[in-house]
Every structure is written in C-alpha cells, then in structure tokens.
Image: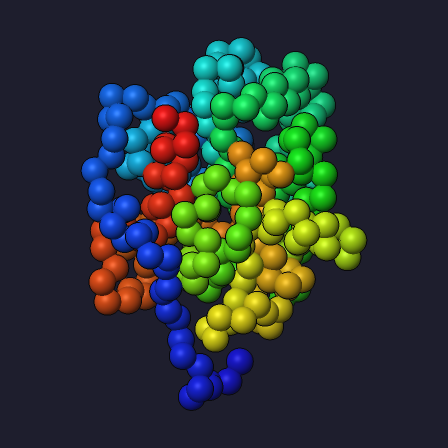
C-alpha cells in the first residue's frame, strides 16, 4: 500500500463520558464477580485477559478445559466466562475447531456450557481463538444462530497489526458504552475472515448484532487491505447474541486496555485506554 498524503492516520474518538467513567472509582468494591479465564492447549493471552478483568473489579480464575472435563471445576460457580486467544491444538482442525469439538463431543461439558449460556445472569466474551471457538457453539448460545464462522485471511498469512475499528450500535453489554467509538486495537490472527451468507449478514444487521467493524483511517467501513487485515465482508469483526450477554470478537481488547500497550498514542491517553470500558461495563452489569 503506497503512502497517502491524504490519509489522516490512526485516531481516537470516544463517546462523551467514557474518559470520566474510566477515572471514576469503582462502586460495590466488596462484590467481586467471578470470571472464568478459559483456555485450552495452545491458547495464550490468558494473563492479559485476567489482568483486564481484575482491573475492572473481577475475581479472575484460571480455568483450563481439562479442569472442566475432570470435574475439578464447573462453570456453575461463575458469572462470567472469557475464552482467550491463541492457537488451540495448533489450529490443525481449523481455527477454534478442536476446542469447540472438545466441548460438543463431550455431552456433559456441552450441557454445562449450554446451561451457562442460558442463565440470564451470565456474560461471556470470546476473543480471537475464543471467538472462533464460540462461533462453532451457536447451537448452545441463544440468539447466535446467524453468527459467521471464521476462516483463512484473504492475505493467506498471519496478520499482527494495530487496526482501526468502529464500535457499532448493538446489543452487546460489554460494548454498549463504547458505541460510536473509533479506536485502534491489537489484531493477531491468521483465520479471522468472517464467512457467512448474504442473508445471514443482513439478519445480523437488522438484529443489531454486528458489534464492531474494521474501518479505514477515514472512518469508513472497508474491505481494503491492510486496514481490513482479513477481508471480512463489510469489515465485520465482532458479533453479539440477541440479548447482548455473549460477545465474540477477533481483535484483542485485553491487549489494548492499557495505554502502555498502544504502539501509537494520542494526546490524553491515560493509563487505562477506552477498551478498559468493556470490562468495567461487564462488572457494572453483573453487580
């Protein structure tokens, strides 16, 4: 991509009140919702995910799939679940497929996940590999039947970038406070292109389930590489369930929630970036 003198570069635009909300003291600090930081063989970013939830007032608990399969732990005791990024089973069965099958092919575990998703007092987040995995559990997640699967990037290569996204009006509990924001976020995936029919894409749009899309530096949705690193139609890169309790996204908010993690920083960016609002919103909703 050639240099463009008209390209304004990266920018940060957030809704009014977000900066003040990030600086506001937490309420009900004695109440710490428990979040399962869920991982599988080959998964990474669990430390960053735990740090993001902890900073927002959660009790973050490391939960490996082997803990659930062996019954050392159960999802019954958690109010939130965060499926982390990485490369479960080396992506040899397709991104997130091995992880999803370890749930779907174990009746007791599938029932446990389905019960969790159906509880009205729970939240779930899937990021990158966790997003790919959740996209294959749509039979267990209420209101997720039109979600896409995620397949090989158009570039045919792994993409690690700091990319601009727009937070769309959607039902997502985690992203509600950031609707209308234009922000850079860390991207790190080889299979992030949303694959879905035109009818499914239209239904997601009508239902306000498209939660985030890639945009160019001019703020317009794009499929142009590298602003859209994977080629997803319309820039789609995050979806929500109909009731907003489950959010799945390819970019990494847990690698972007602190200003120190940003490779480019606008003036006024504090210790907590606007992405920290996702985790604070989760805590506020659960309290």
Write down the quadrant of residue 268 in the picture: bottom left
Instruction: Tell me where residue 190 appears, x and y as whole percent.
Output: 58, 55
Residue 53 versus residue 18 in the image, above or below: above
Write down the quadrant of residue 120 in the picture: top right
Residue 175 versus residue 119 in the image, above or below: below
Instruction: Tell me where residue 95 appears, x and y as whole percent.
Output: 63, 44
Instruction: Tell me where residue 238 appears, x and y as whole percent.
Output: 56, 50
Q: For this rendering, which residue is in front, 5 or 152?
A: 5
Q: Is 141 on the left or on the right of 57, as rendered?
A: right
| Residue depicted at x 58% and y 35% | 243
Please count the marks in the image: 0
Q: Is residue 149 visible?
A: no
| Residue depicted at x 49% and y 60% | 166
Residue 146 versus residue 286 in the image, above or below: below
Q: Is residue 178 visible?
A: yes
Q: Is 180 on the left or on the right of 170, as rendered?
A: left
Q: Is 70 on the left or on the right of 197, as rendered?
A: left
Instruction: Tell me where residue 141 appears, x and y as whole percent.
Output: 65, 31
């Amino acid at each position: 991509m050639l240099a463009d003198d008209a390209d304004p570069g990266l920018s940060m635009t957030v809704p009014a009140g977000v900066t003040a909300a990030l600086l506001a003291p937490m309420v009900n600090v004695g109440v710490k919702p428990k979040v399962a930081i869920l991982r599988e063989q080959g998964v990474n970013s669990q430390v960053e995910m735990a740090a993001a939830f902890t900073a927002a007032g959660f009790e973050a608990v490391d939960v490996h799939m082997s803990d659930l399969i062996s019954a050392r732990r159960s999802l019954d005791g958690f109010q939130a679940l965060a499926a982390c990024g990485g490369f479960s089973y080396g992506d040899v069965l397709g991104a997130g497929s091995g992880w999803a099958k370890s749930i779907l092919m174990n009746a007791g575990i599938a029932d446990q996940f389905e019960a969790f998703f159906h509880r009205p007092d729970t939240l779930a987040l899937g990021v990158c590999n966790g997003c790919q995995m959740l996209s294959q559990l749509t039979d267990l997640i209420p209101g997720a039947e039109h979600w896409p699967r995620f397949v090989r990037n158009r570039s045919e290569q792994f993409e690690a970038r700091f990319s601009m996204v727009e937070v769309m009006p959607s039902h997502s509990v985690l992203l509600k406070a950031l609707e209308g924001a234009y922000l850079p976020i860390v991207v790190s995936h080889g299979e992030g292109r949303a694959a879905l029919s035109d009818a499914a894409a239209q239904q997601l749009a009508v239902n306000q389930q498209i939660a985030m899309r890639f945009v160019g530096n001019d703020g317009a949705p794009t499929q142009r590489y590298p602003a859209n690193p994977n080629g997803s139609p319309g820039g789609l890169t995050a979806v929500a369930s109909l009731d907003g309790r489950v959010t799945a996204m390819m970019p990494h908010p847990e690698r972007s929630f602190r200003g120190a993690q940003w490779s480019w920083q606008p003036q006024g960016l504090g210790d907590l970036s606007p992405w920290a609002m996702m985790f604070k919103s989760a805590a506020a909703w659960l309290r």
